[in-house]
Amino acid sequence: MTPTPPPAFDLGPALALTLAALNIVNILYTWWRTRDQNVETRFRAGSERMDRLDTRLASVEQTLRAQPSKDDLHQLQLALKEVQGELKTMTAIMEGNNKIMERLEGIVARHENHLLDGAK
């Protein structure tokens, strides 16, 4: 019987496994070196965004503080009702004055007619 030679060592799978391990190490190294930069950039962008939101929120709060409240609107409504009542009173007084003026105009017209007719 002849001895069988040992199987030949195939470098293909070992080389593929080594390359895969190197790729993983490269990915981890790149992530480790750039993680601080990404976090810092994202933190800075988030901080700027939050500052803009704080500014907008302060502006909205200031606008809302300047708006009239429910009580202010109620006081305004009461004041308008009071003005409306005073306008009705003034209208009644003006109508009375107009009627007086019409009577006075009639009296003055009669006096004019009497004086004009009496002089003839």
Image: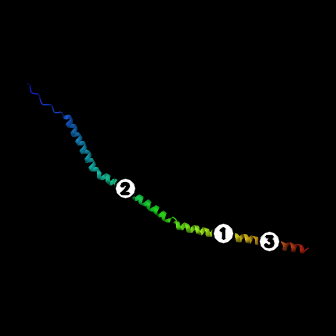
Q: Nearer the viewer, residue 104 or 32?
A: 104
The residue lying at 21 percent from left, 34 percent from top is 12
* Amino acid type for the residue under numbered disc 1: Leu
Disc tally is: 3
Q: Which quarter of the figure has residue 25?
A: top left
**Which of pointers 2 and 1 lies earlier in the amino acid sequence?**
2
- Residue 31 placement, left or right of 97: left
Residue 94 percent across, percent down from the top left: 71, 70
Q: How is the image coloured?
A: rainbow
- Residue 10 placement, left or right of 27: left
Residue 87 image label: 1
Residue 112 percent across, percent down from the top left: 84, 73
- Residue 45 placement, left or right of 83: left
Question: SS for tag 3?
Answer: helix
- How far apart marks 1 and 3 lie (CA) works out to 26 Å
**Which of pointers 2 and 3 lies earlier in the amino acid sequence?**
2
The residue labelled by disc 3 is 105
The residue labelled by disc 2 is 46
The residue lying at 57 percent from left, 67 percent from top is 76
Q: Nearer the viewer, residue 48 or 5?
A: 5
**Which of pointers 1 and 3 lies earlier in the amino acid sequence?**
1
* Amino acid type for the residue under numbered disc 3: Glu
Residue 99 percent across, percent down from the top left: 76, 70
Question: SS for tag 2?
Answer: helix
